[in-house]
Image (cartoon, grey):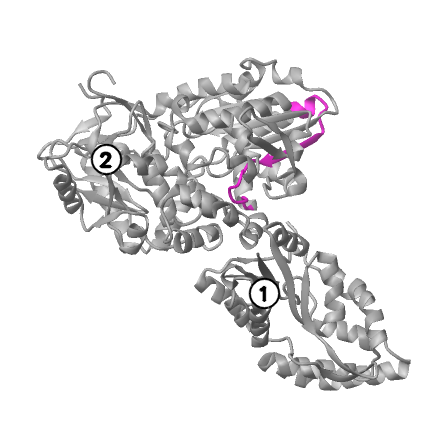
């Protein structure tokens, strides 16, 4: 038995981590609180843009600090709406068929994403993934502190988490698959025997070409 | 006495000019070498449209097509993909002619529910421009992509099990074809292994239905797979095809082509080099020098640019087996060259194209399938080379692949072939798992890659050649790694290759050069009437 590890944002769906966050911010509290939260997020946008380019982990930490003060119940409750209103409409046409193809091949499907686990679970249920490895917010008395629990699922850390996951389940990494759209996921792609570039950005496309990794596009219906 | 297409070289004979991939090279061969040239081109039909109309109105073992139509029925037309003819033919392609006539006839009989499926089997999906070239602008604009599309062998929802043969082989076919009131298959027969029951049973099936016959043992028992009567592959496929015909309402149309691969201005490429006039000699020399100087990408672009002026030489319609018998007869008429006696050394120039690299580079695995597969199998009666003899090929064997079309080939050649060349081990240990590789399946379904099982089949395709030939020597390889991986030797020149072949035999070998392309088949008779 072996597994297929999927990045999610940009790989299976057109959204990124910011879209669900904005949805949460726009649906939490009174209009004044919403305006204040969105204003704060807007103010942080340039820093986050910089972090997105240079360090995914820092980007995640900055992004999830916007969740400070949200209740755990509310996060869970809204997760279904986030999926229906934000994620589901942005699913790539062949995302489900790719996941199902992996399952038909006898592989365990694991989503490895910087998204919050409560949202990721919704997507996993919809596409038929077996497991998720996502980010979790730190909670104190049922209220988010704005920090993420370690390990932060981003960049090279994904590779370590995959290695650990495979070891725990007795999977041979040489037999495992990984799918991602982003050059920042090269570490994750490199630890498995069968990496694939899905809707790749320019740098990943070049790398995939150089190493003869399979490369394909899920973004367009035939 | 030799057939006019068989020439024995003399001491003062000119060098032969042959393909080495997309280059033309000159090779000097010893006196006594037998060179087999393609047969003269058969004159094409004067009015192909009339021949198509006549064939569907006067079919073999069937009512005329118009008598099988009724208003409101559901009809599917299946056509061959771009793997034939090679190179793709000048417009109008015969498929366009057949479709135009069929669609008119269907419209006249009140048939509106029509879909056209490109019967790719597990070949790559054809691109829109390729489909347009094949079916013409009018049909393309009207039908693509909703009612004219590629078969998808991995679309589980749209494949349906038709039945099981007496040998336990499961036939799984395209749902639309199965659920139609009438399936019309419009074929082009490029070589004798095309068409017949293969059209429906392979072109519209799934990997599951290919596996029972696309295997090393079937190929080993095919003597050769270009001679349907002695091809185990053809027999096995016919079993599935007969089952398809029992369960489905099938009407087939088959066409044959002549060997007009090159423009008439390049006819000298098919001629005995000793018979060329001064102008032709100069042109040939010019081609040799040009292809030697141009970069590979430019050579490929040139060959891609010029479709072949093939002419249609026959059209038959009706019941599959009856039609195919006529087709094979006409096909042999174009290709078969009578030859007496097998050679110790067979020289096969490897050209730039195979059925599986249209608009792409001929990668090493495809070089293998041309050498030990298709060209080795170009015979009727007995192989052109003796058992244990030497096959010399000319090709650079560059370690180069098209990353889109041949993505699974890369992994097969560089990851699996280094483990083993044994076709049975490949089939039993690696094939099924590889065939399910989800990344390659996705590339096959939504990109333009061959199915991941395809590289395995390409290896098996060379199996009877591999078992029969003692050694393969490559002349002109630009590396040693690929030939070694394929189990071949390399030689820096034809002289060196022939010298080695001589050492092996301990005497002067009998040498035969197959002067291809265009295609030819040896009709071998052995001394003593074998």
Q: Which chain hosts label 2?
A: B
Q: In the rendered structure, which segment of residues is drawn in magenta?
A: B105-127
Residue picked out by circle 1: A180
Residue picked out by circle 2: B388
Q: Quadrant of the N terminus of chain B?
A: top left
Tell me where residue A11 sits by quadrant.
Answer: bottom right
Examine the rendering and report whether any part of residue B358 can be seen: no
Cα–Cα gap, marks 1 and 2: 50 Å
Q: Is residue B367 left or right of residue B180?
A: left
Give the percent coordinates (x, y) of residue B516. 30, 35
Q: Toward the viewer: B58 or B362?
A: B362
Residue B77: in magenta span: no
Q: Residues within 10 Å of mark 1 (few under 14, many from 20)?
A: many
Instruction: Please say if A134 is above or below B34.
Output: below
Q: Is residue A166 left or right of residue B219?
A: right
Q: Residue at x 34, y 34 (%)?
A: B464
Q: Secondary structure at mark 2?
A: strand
């Amino acid at each position: 038995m072996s597994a297929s590890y999927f990045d999610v944002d940009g790989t299976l769906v057109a959204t990124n981590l910011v879209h669900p966050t904005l949805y949460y911010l726009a649906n939490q509290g009174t209009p004044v609180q919403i305006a204040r939260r969105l204003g704060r997020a807007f103010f942080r946008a340039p820093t986050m843009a910089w972090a997105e380019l240079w360090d995914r982990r820092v980007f995640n930490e900055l992004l999830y600090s916007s969740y400070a003060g949200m209740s755990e119940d509310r996060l869970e409750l809204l997760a279904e709406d986030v999926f229906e209103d934000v994620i589901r409409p942005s699913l790539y046409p062949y995302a489900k068929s790719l996941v199902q193809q992996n399952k038909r091949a006898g592989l365990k499907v694991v989503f490895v994403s910087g998204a919050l686990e409560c949202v990721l679970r919704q997507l996993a249920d919809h596409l038929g993934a077996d497991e998720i490895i996502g980010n979790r917010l730190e909670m104190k008395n049922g209220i988010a502190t704005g920090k993420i629990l370690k390990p932060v699922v981003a960049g090279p850390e994904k590779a370590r988490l995959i290695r650990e996951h495979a070891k725990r389940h007795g999977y041979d990494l040489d037999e495992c698959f990984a799918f991602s759209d982003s050059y920042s996921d090269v570490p994750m792609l490199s630890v498995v025997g069968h990496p694939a570039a899905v809707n790749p950005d320019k740098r990943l496309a070049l790398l995939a070409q150089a190493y003869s990794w399979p490369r394909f596009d899920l973004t367009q219906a035939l | 006495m030799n057939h006019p297409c068989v020439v024995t070289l003399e001491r003062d004979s000119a060098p032969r000019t042959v393909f080495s991939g997309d280059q033309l090279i000159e090779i000097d061969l010893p006196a006594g070498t037998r060179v087999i040239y393609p047969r003269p081109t058969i004159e094409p039909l004067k009015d192909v449209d009339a021949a198509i109309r006549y064939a569907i109105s006067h079919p073999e073992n069937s009512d005329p097509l118009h008598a099988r139509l009724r208003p409101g029925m559901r009809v599917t037309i299946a056509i061959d993909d771009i793997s034939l003819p090679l190179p793709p033919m000048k417009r109008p392609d015969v498929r366009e002619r057949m479709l135009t006539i069929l669609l008119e006839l269907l419209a006249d009989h009140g048939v509106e529910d029509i879909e056209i499926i490109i019967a790719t089997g597990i070949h790559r999906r054809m691109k829109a421009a390729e489909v347009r070239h094949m079916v013409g602008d009018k049909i393309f604009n009207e039908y693509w992509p909703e009612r004219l599309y590629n078969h998808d062998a991995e679309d589980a929802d749209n494949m349906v099990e038709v039945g099981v043969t007496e040998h336990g082989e499961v036939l799984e076919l395209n749902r639309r074809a199965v659920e139609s009131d009438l399936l019309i298959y419009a074929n082009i027969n490029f070589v004798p292994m095309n068409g017949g029951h293969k059209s429906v049973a392979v072109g519209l099936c799934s990997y599951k239905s290919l596996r029972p016959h696309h295997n090393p043992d079937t190929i080993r028992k095919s003597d050769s797979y270009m001679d349907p009567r002695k091809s185990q592959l053809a027999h096995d496929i016919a079993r599935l095809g007969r089952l398809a015909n029992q369960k489905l309402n099938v009407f087939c149309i088959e066409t044959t082509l002549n060997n007009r691969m090159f423009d008439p201005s390049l006819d000298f490429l098919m001629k005995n080099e000793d018979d060329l006039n001064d102008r032709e000699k100069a042109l040939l020399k010019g081609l040799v020098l040009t292809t030697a100087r141009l970069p590979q990408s430019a050579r490929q672009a040139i060959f891609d640019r010029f479709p072949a002026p093939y002419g249609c030489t026959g059209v038959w319609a009706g019941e599959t087996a009856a039609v195919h018998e006529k087709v094979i007869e006409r096909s042999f008429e174009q290709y078969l060259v009578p030859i007496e006696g097998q050679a110790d050394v067979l020289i096969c120039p490897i050209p730039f194209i195979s059925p599986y690299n249209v608009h792409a580079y001929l990668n090493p695995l495809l070089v293998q399938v041309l050498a030990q597969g298709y060209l080795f199998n170009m015979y009727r009666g007995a192989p052109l080379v003796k058992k244990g003899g030497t096959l010399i090929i000319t090709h650079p064997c560059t370690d180069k692949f098209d990353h889109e079309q041949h993505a699974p080939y890369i992994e097969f050649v560089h990851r699996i072939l280094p483990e083993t060349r044994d076709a049975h081990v490949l089939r039993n240990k690696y094939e099924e798992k590889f065939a399910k590789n989800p990344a390659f399946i996705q590339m096959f379904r939504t990109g333009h890659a061959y199915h991941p099982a395809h590289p395995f089949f390409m290896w098996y395709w060379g199996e009877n050649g591999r078992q029969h030939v003692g050694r393969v020597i490559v002349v002109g390889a630009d590396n040693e790694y690929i030939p070694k991986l394929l189990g071949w030797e390399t030689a820096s020149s034809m002289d060196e290759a022939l010298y080695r072949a001589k050492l092996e035999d301990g005497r002067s070998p009998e040498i035969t050069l197959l002067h291809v392309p265009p295609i030819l088949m040896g009709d071998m008779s052995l001394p003593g009437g074998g």
